[in-house]
Image (tube, grey):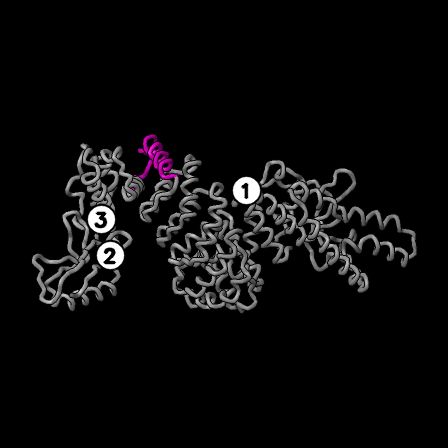
Amino acid sequence: MALITLRKNLYRVSDFQMHRALAALKNQPLNHVHKVVKERLCPWLCSRQPEPFGVRFHHAHCKKFHSKNGNDLHPLGGPVFFQVSDCDRLEQNVKNEESQMFYKRLSNLTSSEEVLSFISTMETLPDTMAAGALQRICEVEKKDGDQGLPKEILENSIFQALCFQFEKEPSQLSNTSLVTALQALILLHVDPQSSLLLNLVAECQNRLRKGGMEVRNLCILGESLITLHSSGCVTLELIINQLQGEKLETFTPEDIVALYRILQACTEKVDEHQTFLNKINNFSLSIVSNLSPKLISQMLTALVFLDQSQAFPLIIKLGKYVVRHVPHFTNEELRRVLEAFIYFGHHDTFFTKALEHRVAAVCLTLDPEVVCRVMEYCSRELILSKPILNAVAETFVCQTEKFSPRQISALMEPFGKLNYLPPNASALFRKLENVLFTHFNYFPPKSLLKLLHSCSLNECHPVNFLAKIFKPLFLQRLQGKESHLDTLSRAQLTQLFLASVLECPFYKGPKLLPKYQVKSFLTPCCSLETPVDSQLYRYVKIGLTNLLGARLYFAPKVLTPYCYTIAFSPVDQCNVEGIKAKKIVFVRVSHEEFFLSSLTRC
């Protein structure tokens, strides 16, 4: 989307009015002439000496933009200078007051039209105010979604003139105005190949090579280039090197998070910056309390991408403050927080309680992807939260159509893993069965297998779909381009097959071929059985040996014909003198529990 520039036949108002002033005062005394010219031109020229760039408005009839630059020439060929220190001080005070009033009024405007209408009433517009106006336009447009500018704004002559000045005179801008304007235009989805953005980016890179940019401007520039996907890591590395030379104590919380995001964009060089990252991680502990919900979610996301698992004190402290912000996170921010907690394996009771309140209150309005992340969080951390599971089940029954096949699988899997049936279980599985009948072929093979396996764990055996998943065609799709089917998928298929044999004797469909079956559900990498705690296992083993008198009277980790592993099993004809087994119960290790034998000495 290229921006339209102004017409080329604009006349210079400052020169035109200067001619008229000099002609009208031709026959007046010199001191009177100096006084009148100073009064007429000081608001334009004296105030512009510190800031050569500006935009000026002509209010005759059409109210068009005109360039106003402090280097405008006198009609006789030289620049005009006024050495009036009192006027300079007065102008500076007036300028500060006008600037405060400008930004105050700007923050109260709620549409791009209002912003453009407001700035068109101003006599002059310094570069900082012009950049501020673009930034405000960006803010109000972002409230309506991540869309570009509407056509009527692009064709607005006021907006075109703003962009025209930024395009033609980027070297006249201050550092702050330059990076602010660049950031706003990028967020407004201006064409990256337009001359406007190319000129601004080139000017930023030129100043970056010269050095001397402030910390805040470096951070804004880095984030802007990341959004623009421009210059790769070369320019970002230059920004990182300059920021390394600054004291972190001078950084604001926004700057620290921006620094994380800049480093995140150069993950391939994270090892080179690990020492700097450790320094940032330690310093960030002192600013966590000042972070907004948005900044917390961005910091956690950056820590994930940078694989900062060793920064656990920072993660724990962020988790503590996340609890306070759970009601205020947007859907996207909450999704990022949950993904970070899943990645780092972090959870605590207070966060779970806050999440329960949030999900139970607004589950019907939550984004489907957020609902899936909530369920994945509960599943990974084995959190049996009835308020969350009940709310999600109700949401699925009421709004099934908003979930994709992959999301439905992710949503239903935790019910089986946690072995929980919600109060509306009948409606839930009836709705799920209808979806499977109508969209069976739309489910990814592995997602479908996980979904059916989860149903089987809850004793809702998917008999109507077993024939389809045991067919060679589906198994071929499940295997994909791999040379063999992965162990977890084979174990899930085996459990479904055993369920059909043991629980559904009326099933007469295809059987699972032996080559797709496993001999044990207890495998090192991905097990369908919960491994026994090693320390507990050792204590029980020693206790049984001492109790029975010898190791030969029991066998550990016995594999049954049904693929399950029994933790301890007695051997045949176990007769031990002086010991009577009053109550001996040897039970296999299930998915969630470990039951230990109860032995009593006579």
Of the residues tagged 2 and 1, which is closer to the observer?
Answer: 2
Q: Residues within 10 Å of mark 3 (few under 14, many from 20)?
A: some
Q: Is residue 317 magenta?
A: no
Q: Residues within 10 Å of mark 2 (few under 14, many from 20)?
A: few
- The amino acid marked with disc number 2 is Phe
Residue at 76 percent across and 60 percent down: it is: 93
Q: Is residue 427 magenta?
A: yes
Position in image of residue 19 (x %, y %): 82, 48
- The amino acid marked with disc number 1 is Gly
- Sequence order check, earlier mark of 3 and 2: 3
Position in image of residue 514 (x %, y %): 14, 42
- Sequence order check, earlier mark of 2 and 1: 1
Of the residues tagged 3 and 2, which is closer to the observer?
Answer: 2
* Disc 3, SS: helix
Residue at 54 percent across and 42 percent down: it is: 145
Q: Which residue is mark 1?
A: 145
Q: Gap between marks 3 and 2, in whole Å?
A: 26 Å
Q: Which residue is mark 2?
A: 595
* Disc 1, SS: loop
Q: Is residue 471 left or right of residue 369?
A: left
Which numbered marker is on residue 487?
Answer: 3
Position in image of residue 53 (x %, y %): 68, 53
Of the residues tagged 3 and 1, which is closer to the observer?
Answer: 3
Considering every residue shown, the one lying at the far front of the view is 602
Question: Magenta residues?
Answer: 424-446
Residue at 53 percent across and 43 percent down: it is: 146
Q: Is residue 31 left or right of residue 208?
A: right
Considering every residue shown, the one lying at the far top of the view is 438
Q: Is residue 215 visible?
A: yes
Q: Is residue 91 left or right of residue 254?
A: right
